[in-house]
Amino acid sequence: MKKNAFLLVLFMTLISCGRSYHELPFGGMNGKVEKVTEYHIMPGIWFAGFKGTDVMYMNATAYDINGNEICSAVMDSIGRIQAEAENFFENDICVRSTQRAGGRTLAQINFKERSGNRLVYDKIAGSQMIRMVVKENSFLRIFKSTVSEDGEKKLKNVIRINRHGYPVSVDVYDLKAGTSSHEKNTYDENKNLIEKCITRTDVSGEETLEIVYSQYLEFDEQGNWIEACTYNKNKLPVEIIRREIEYWKQ
């Protein structure tokens, strides 16, 4: 995953906090995962066997004992935090979420109430207070949500999951900007993502296609991968990812 894509994930985590569809506990990994640190390495350096500073950037995610994602961060090659998100849960509902970047708070979202399929939040961005409403519904394995800010529709998400709970397609419509992204995911028999196909449409209607293939090279004793290589749509290596996984002690 590219660095800017990870920043987008942090933001999407903020705006979707508390929805009825949640990512799988512990990020879909086996066992009770406490923390995951990923090191993104330039493939040319990795293939050459270079032992020096080979990391492009890092990201880390931490989970509570119930598998809720409580914080995530993207860091530069020496571990300085570039952006981070922090979530607080009560009864498995995210009641507060904060996004920071460059040493300052970009936004904070506070849960106010739930009424039927409507979740109401107060979003603080800079000195501005925004009333944010997430309206959601689901049918079988299709989950839909619409995000409004001060009554104006801003985002629409449609997530389709397979029988294991993994998202096989994610459609995101930026209703305010007039752009969209459409993601299709393919998994292997061990539920590892092996192909991600993303089509993005800009305001002019022009589409761009990005395909990422993943090959898993090493696994830990729990069956979670700890080393992988990603390739672009031309099957050229993009990066090597090494993961350090810490588990909650039983």
Image: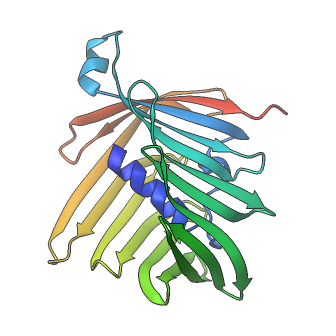
Side of 156 relative to 43 (left or right) = right
Q: Is residue 175 above or below residue 210?
A: below
Which residue: 30% across, 61% down? 198
Is residue 164 visible in this depiction of the protein?
A: no
Query: In front: 146, or 164?
Result: 146
Q: Which image quadrant is residue 245 in?
A: top right
- Give the quarter of the figure containing the N terminus: top left
Which residue: 78% across, 45% down? 65
Side of 98 relative to 206 (left or right) = right
Q: Is residue 143 above or below residue 151?
A: above
Query: In front: 113, or 140?
Result: 113
Q: Residue furthest front?
A: 127
Which residue: 31% across, 11% down? 49
Percent coordinates x, y for residue 75 in the rendering: 44, 35
Which residue: 14% across, 77% down? 204
Percent coordinates x, y for residue 170 in the rendering: 43, 68
Is residue 82 visible in this depiction of the protein?
A: yes
Percent coordinates x, y for residue 26 in the rendering: 66, 47
Percent coordinates x, y for residue 194 in the rendering: 40, 47
Q: Is residue 248 above or below residue 13?
A: above
Q: How many labels sit on residues?
A: 0
